[in-house]
Amino acid sequence: MAASANRDSANVPMSEIVRLETQKPRSLTTEALAHLRRDRLTLFAIGMLVLLTLACVVLPPIIENQLEVSATRTNVIDRYKPPGTDNYFLGTDALGRDQFTRLLYGGRVSLGVAYGASLMSITIGVVIGMMAGFYGGLFDDAVNSFIAILSSIPTLFLLILVSVIFNPTPQVLIILLGLLGWITTCRLVRGEVLALKERDFIVAAQSLGAPSHQILLRHLLPNVLSLVIVTLTIDAGSLILIESGLSFLGLGVRPPTPSWGNMLTDARSSLATGQHLIIWPGIMIFVTVLCFFLVGDGLRDALDPRRKR
Amino acid sequence: MNSFLARRLLQAIPTLFGISLLSFMLMLATPGDPITTITFRPSNDPGAAEILRRQLGLDQPPLIQYVYWLIGNDWVRMDVDGDGEDDVYGTRRGVLRGDFGQSIQLKRPVWELITERVPATLLLSLPSIAIGYMAGILIGLLAASNHQSWFDQLARVLSVAGNAIPNFWLGMVLILIFSVNLNWLPMGGMRDITQRQAGFNLMNSLPYMIMPVMVFSLSIVSSVSRYTRTQILEVLEQDYVRTARAKGLSSGKVLRVHVMRNALIPIATLIGPSIGFLLSGAVIIEQVFSWPGLGRLAIEAVSQRDYPVIMGTVVISGVMYLIGLIISDILYGLIDPRIRL
């Protein structure tokens, strides 16, 4: 690292070096925040996610009251209304329910599952991954072989089997996806801890007699944290895809509770009459997942201390 | 090489046991049972249902059922009529002796059902994987060698978007555009159902393949191109690339000989697992396009609690996955001379 720093500084003008030398050292967090402030795309994606989440939580009852539409009341006369008729922003579905409010209610489910399950799987993954990487030995072997088995059953089959056993309400789905999704995180964290364990500052802490829980929490955890934050956002995006896929197959959230996935299942049977019913749930999934992925990418750039200036 | 293969195959055995045991237990824990779905008719004699259950061995405790599934039950006598005396020997030979059992719903050997469906899944996934990898590597290469050009930016945006788009929705939108509105392509299925002659004809199936293959390969293209791009960018910074340039090699040659070969190594590891997911990766796409592949067989089996079929598909895809991993290790060794198998 030192050699490459010298090599780079050869191209830097003297004034720049003086500026760098006299600059106050900045912490990773301030560096990352400063980087994020310049990254318009990531800021935009974060804004979109905040807006979407707020809209899903706050808006549905207000809209239902103000516009006198309903996400649950069926209405035979108003079936398959195209977007923009009467008070129906995005039209109505096969049972005459307002699609816009249904999308927002569905968003509560999809986003809730994404946030809940990704938090859960990250927590499990970090705890098990750090323990396996740090302690090694029998525990590490056991974790590894369990991961080997679990990851060679195709995830979808596993999810299908498990979601048939437990009738999936959104809450159950959070737990299921959380319990099945920790493998990737665990692998990543374990690898990172294995590498960090050999580094000087850990060896120093150990030789000074620091107890292992202190090494884990004070020295290792902060170092895997940026990895964890990035995985968390990417995971949340993939979980929305998985949840909607499962619901689409009829194995996730069951009607009448709307979710973006099962709204698409309903839409499949009205290909000719209700094309707006296919377009909008998909766009919601796409935009949300895209935002999560963009935020993940942006955070990865912002949190990578080795990134180029 | 041979000892490596032998070791890997030996290591795969406990994993396969684990897979089958875990899925067997999960499967038996699912509520609902196949006997009721077959015999559910008010006029049926409940006693007959019990006899059927005993004949199929479904009255046994889970672990015994697993053992029978694994090594067969032709060495034990079963009490079929329920009078407490053993009557006949079982007829199953067990997975270890090549007998995957019989489908409870379709009353046909599971092995036959699976081999019937595998070609359809292969027809869908092999072209998708081939197109996906070729296009992905090409796009990644072009993007990385024109780093920060408009093409690079476009490729980045497209790969993130391609990963974020739900593929079943993309399939539905394509159906909406090309089948419902334009009426150019068939909506689903694998061939014209009015077609007289039996057997498979590629020219007949081609129009049916276009949309599913498109959707399937898009998801592969977006991840492969992204991965290739980062790999190549990383290799481009290595000292040996600078050396190669410094000694005056043409940039094409540097790219081909020095960069590509090194960047392709990690990509080879991606191919293995994706071969393994050949059989299962297409479940949702098969569902959207009513493609008669293995994925649909599995979904149908789960919804009908057809235990032998579920187990058959799980085991087959587990085996495929493990084979894929081994293949990727072998590829690794072939491409990277530093690694000795």
Image (tube, coloured by chain):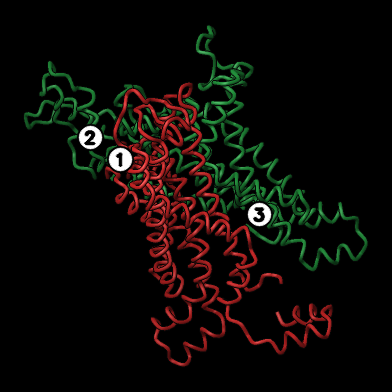
Q: Which residue is mark 2?
A: B32
Task: State which chain disc 3 sits on.
Answer: B
| Residue most extreme to the right | B248
- B270 relative to A86, above or below: below
The residue closer to the viewer here, A103 or B267, is: A103
Q: Are marks 1 and 3 in contact (CB under 8 Å)?
A: no
Q: Which residue is mark 3?
A: B333
Q: Amino acid at mark 1?
A: Val
Q: Amino acid at mark 3?
A: Gly
Q: Which chain is red?
A: A
- B17 relative to A281, above or below: below
Dot 1: what SS? Answer: helix
The residue closer to the viewer here, A187 or B329, is: A187
Q: Position of residue A193 (x, y in %)?
A: 50, 72
Q: Position of residue A261 (x, y in %)?
A: 42, 39
In the image: residue A77, left or right of residue B58: right
Please tell me the numbered disc located at residue A164: 1
Q: Amino acid at mark 2?
A: Gly
For the residues beneath circles 1 and 2, the answer to whether they share a chain is no
Q: How far separated are the C-alphas under marks 1 and 2?
A: 10 Å
How packed mark 2 is, by other alpha carbons closer than 10 Å (few <14, some 14-19, many 20 or more), is some
The quarter of the picture where residue A86 lies is top left
Q: Are marks 3 and 2 in contact (CB under 8 Å)?
A: no
Dot 3: what SS? Answer: helix
The C terminus of chain B sits in image quarter = bottom right
Q: Are marks 1 and 2 in contact (CB under 8 Å)?
A: yes
Q: Which chain is green?
A: B
